[in-house]
Image (cartoon, coloured by chain):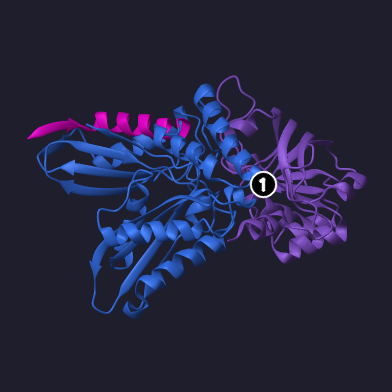
Amino acid sequence: MTGIPGNDAVRRIGTPLMDAVVGSLKAGDKVLLSGFIYTARDAAHKRFSEALAAGKELPFDIKGQVIYYCGPAPAPPGRVIGSCGPTTSSRMDSYAPGLISLGLGGMIGKGKRSDQVKQALIEHRAVYFGATGGAGALLARAVVAADVIAYEDLGPEAVVRLEVRDMPLFVINDIFGNDLYEAGTERYRR
Amino acid sequence: MREIHIDDITAAIERLFIDANINLSGNMYTAIKDAIDREASPVGKEVLRELLRNADVAREEKMPICQDTGLAVAFLEIGQDTHITGGDLSEAVSEGVRRAYRNGYLRKSCCHPFTRKNTGDNTPPIVHIKIVPGDRLKVTVLPKGGGSENYGEVRMLTPSQGKEGVRAFILEMVRKGGPNPCPPITVGIGIGGNFEMSALLSKEALMVPPGERSTDPEMADLEREILEEINRTGIGPQGYGGTVTALDVHIKMAPCHLASLPVAVNIQCHAHRMKEAVL
């Protein structure tokens, strides 16, 4: 694994993710992401899954897109969004492989993924990014626009399209089967 | 009999929840800052610096430190010589929470266990009341995020498992959580009492300031040992690998039944938000 972070220069990437970009990202890379991303967490994923089961379309075309596991705090007056850090990704693990097989390009969250998710990343070429959990005020600075596009009734769990500029992320799981959490922990275990 | 009007309690609850969520307390800020020197990983150091920057931005921009502004947990220590006037105490606390989460633009994270329907105003809060000597009322608020709370557990050990069993259980839970509860974590441990008391002790242990050791020398040693061992797991800040997985470990202990050794662990994320006031 090449990807113990801290050595390589920061890379700027954009959405939708091009396959060549996905193929070039390695666990441990630090990236700055710009473009549109879509928030979705527990309840929204349940609705995605119900929509697909009923043969309906998802509220946005997910090909090459990036889902952010996030339920933002309300926007204070004069702001586009409130605090907006990642939530724990593992709760979306049962839904993720299905979405990845439909062309989802990436996910942003925090915490470990299941083997099924990691396998889906390899098979269908997608990537899992980590944003710093609990750094919601800092991450809000990267958001330049926010629009609820689906499931408004879910409140903080609605799907929001965010336009981000230079959102700071680490690649956690890549298409080669590398895992930053495992590699990092292994390296510093005493 | 000293009188305290419920409106003053509501106002204090509102102010404290907003303050706790926006302004990281000085001792937690210092604990994270001090950890930078102890962290061996360059990325770990970078994450810790990012957490301090985040706390600065939150304070400057009056934004919550983390979007998960928690379930509203409040501890009330009510002096037995006080008389609460003006209405229902529970409702006064709920109203304070309602106002804080609305007026402070905090996220409402309280929902029905099965339908997941949001209660809309982050009520009901979780309130722990203790009657103490005196004529003051101390309010402590501890908004607690779900990501770290999910890695808590109560386990009824057998007495023969002893200290070693406690140590192994805590380490198992920390390893299980790994990056998920947003390390560097603070670990609250409740030992003894019974099933529910151990859980409450573990939460109270989180309220001990960072760096402060148990007054019981045996427990103080166990705190040090467990902290050292947690920091050898390699998990590190955000789980990206490193030597600062926990900022501190606190133990609260109570006598228990002859047949039991209840142990509870309550994990807190790096955004350890807590504020108090005395009325």
* Residue at x 23%, y 78% (from the top left corner): B258
Colour applied to chain A: purple
**Chain painted blue:** B
Q: Which residue is mark 1?
A: A69
Majority SS type along the magenta span: helix
Residue closest to the eye, B34 or B134: B34
Give the image quarter of residue B263. Answer: bottom left
Q: Is residue B180 magenta?
A: no
Name the image quarter holding the C terminus of chain A.
Answer: bottom right
Residue closest to the eye, B63 or A31: A31
Q: How many marks?
A: 1
Residue at the limit of the structure toward the top, as seen here? A78
Q: Position of residue A36 (x, y in %)?
A: 78, 35
- Looking at the image, can residue B155 be seen? no
Q: Amino acid at mark 1?
A: Tyr
* Residue at x 41%, y 32% (from the top left corner): B26
User: Disc 1 is attached to a residue of which chain?
Assistant: A
Residue stretch rendered in magenta on the structure: B1-23
Q: Is residue A33 above or below residue A89?
A: above
